[in-house]
């Protein structure tokens, strides 16, 4: 029986992971849960799964949770980043589901790797910011990093049983988000509410905006580089609006192997937890005869500038991907707060990247230094624009 700590248990990935656990009580036990500030949902999860420890990033909410659970609780409650790290490194946990959204997942995920835990990775920002450090530490500790993202799960499955020297390239698919067929000139008027209406996937706010800009695919490109030890020349992206083909792998003889499935995160989550086995889920079978025609096209580079910026950051390397990620998080927050327009997201990221002088990433502190610099730079640019009346 696998002992699980789930970081980000109240988000879409975390709740789906707990659904997998509930459907397979003979295979999994929850030892730890960590969340941001959703006390109500976390309290319900505690009652159902009885973990030994939980953490909330918000200290005030952690105190509220302690009062709610009462003095006879069996679950220890922690708070802040120290609390997240504690849940990520629980001695009894052998597998950590890393599903905290954004850069906040970096420290606890890295701590879990250092502790030799198996990582079911849904937090792509960890790999974007510190992929070289994470994979180096995983090799040192003998820790497995199994992807949860549907695209990387697909690549992993398509690689199994094939010599790595035969690999030519991987092709990540992208739905194109809600604006795939919207002309570029109309995107300046897009509202956060419109951008949050993803046609295929039910995800958190930040990742949904990233899907609308295609930055999510750009982050996945960088993640794929580190997870599968690829050069950037070996990674391509195709728009596939139906989200049935989750990714493809091409071999040097021309063979192309694809992984298909209905667009539901329960499948890759279940596979990450049961790897290399495929456990039965409650999902229906994919019936291709009932699906619309499957189509593929190249992304429009002018419309989806964020994807190109991600490729550029990966080519530069060093601290640039961490800067890209932090600038994107800040810009997305500004857009969701309706303080900038949709097309200003890539403009702010590009301006921040142009101002950055890359440096070597050899410690976690260096990663966080690049992250902090990028956030301060985005805020400064925005303040300067406000002073000019823009």
Image: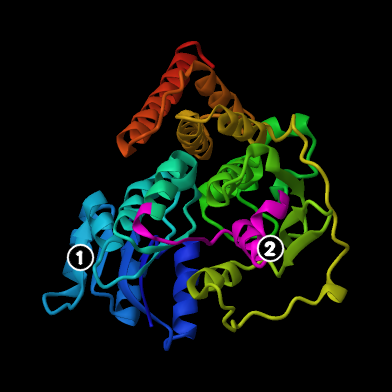
Disc 1: CA contacts within 10 A as few (<14), some (14-19) or many (>=20)? many
The image quarter containing residue 261 is bottom right
**Closer to us: 60 or 349:** 349
**Would you place residue 288 above or below residue 198 in this image?**
below
**Would you place residue 305 above or below residue 9 in this image?**
above
Residue sitting farthest toward the bottom: 26
Q: Residue at x 60, y 83 (%)?
A: 282
Q: Mark 1 points at which residue?
A: 77
Q: Which residue is drawn at 65% across and 58% down?
A: 155
- Name the element at disc 2: loop
Discs 2/1, front = 2
Q: Where is residue 197 in the image (x, y as percent from the top left)?
A: 64, 53
Q: In this view, does 94 lie to the left or right of 147?
A: left
Q: Is residue 202 left or right of residue 32?
A: right
**Closer to us: 117 or 176:** 117
The image quarter containing residue 232 is top right
N-terminal-most mark, 2 or 1: 1
Please identify the quadrant where the N terminus is shown.
Answer: bottom left
Q: Is residue 174 visible?
A: no
Q: In this view, does 85 lie to the left or right of 331?
A: left
Q: Mark 2 points at which residue?
A: 162
Range shown magenta: 140-169
Please identify the quadrant where the C terminus is shown.
Answer: top right
Q: Position of residue 168 (x, y in %)?
A: 74, 48
- Name the element at disc 1: strand
**Closer to us: 57 or 149:** 149
Q: Residue at x 63, y 68 (%)?
A: 264
Cα separation between marks 2 and 1? 45 Å
Disc 2: CA contacts within 10 A as few (<14), some (14-19) or many (>=20)? few
Q: Position of residue 109 (x, y in %)?
A: 36, 54
Q: Residue at x 80, y 44 (%)?
A: 181
Q: How many marks?
A: 2
């Amino acid at each position: 029986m696998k002992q699980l700590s789930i970081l980000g248990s109240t988000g879409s990935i975390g709740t789906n992971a707990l659904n997998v656990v509930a459907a397979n009580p003979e295979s999994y036990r929850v030892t730890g849960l960590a969340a941001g500030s959703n006390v109500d949902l976390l309290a319900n999860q505690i009652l159902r799964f009885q973990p030994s420890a939980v953490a909330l990033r918000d200290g005030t909410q952690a105190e509220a949770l302690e009062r709610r659970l009462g003095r006879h609780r069996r679950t220890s409650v922690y708070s802040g980043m120290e609390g997240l790290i504690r849940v990520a490194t629980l001695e009894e946990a052998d597998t950590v589901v890393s599903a905290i959204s954004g850069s906040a997942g970096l420290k606890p995920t890295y701590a879990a790797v250092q502790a030799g835990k198996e990582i079911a990775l849904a937090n792509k920002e960890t790999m974007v910011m510190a992929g070289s450090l994470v994979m180096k530490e995983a090799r040192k500790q003998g820790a497995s990093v199994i992807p949860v993202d549907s695209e990387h799960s697909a690549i992993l499955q398509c690689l199994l049983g094939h010599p790595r020297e035969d690999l030519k390239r991987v092709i990540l698919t992208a739905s194109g988000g809600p604006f795939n067929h919207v002309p570029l000139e109309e995107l300046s008027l897009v509202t956060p509410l419109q951008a949050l209406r993803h046609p295929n996937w039910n995800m958190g706010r930040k990742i949904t905006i990233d899907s609308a800009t295609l930055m999510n695919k750009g982050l996945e490109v960088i993640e794929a580089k580190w997870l599968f030890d690829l050069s950037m020349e070996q990674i391509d992206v195709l728009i596939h609006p139906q989200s049935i083909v989750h990714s493809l792998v091409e071999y040097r003889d021309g063979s192309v192997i694809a992984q298909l499935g209905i667009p539901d995160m329960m499948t890759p989550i279940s596979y990450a937890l049961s790897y290399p086995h495929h456990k039965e889920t409650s999902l229906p079978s994919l019936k291709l005869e009932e699906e619309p025609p499957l189509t593929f096209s190249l992304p429009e580079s002018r419309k989806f500038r964020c994807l190109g910026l991600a490729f550029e950051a990966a080519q530069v390397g060093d601290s640039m991907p961490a800067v890209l990620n932090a600038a994107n998080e800040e810009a997305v927050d500004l857009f969701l707060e309706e303080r900038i327009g949709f097309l200003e997201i890539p403009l702010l990221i590009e301006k921040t990247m142009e101002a950055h002088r890359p440096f070597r990433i050899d410690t976690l502190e260096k990663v966080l230094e690049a992250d902090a610099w990028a956030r301060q730079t985005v805020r400064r640019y925005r303040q300067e624009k406000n002073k000019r009346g823009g």
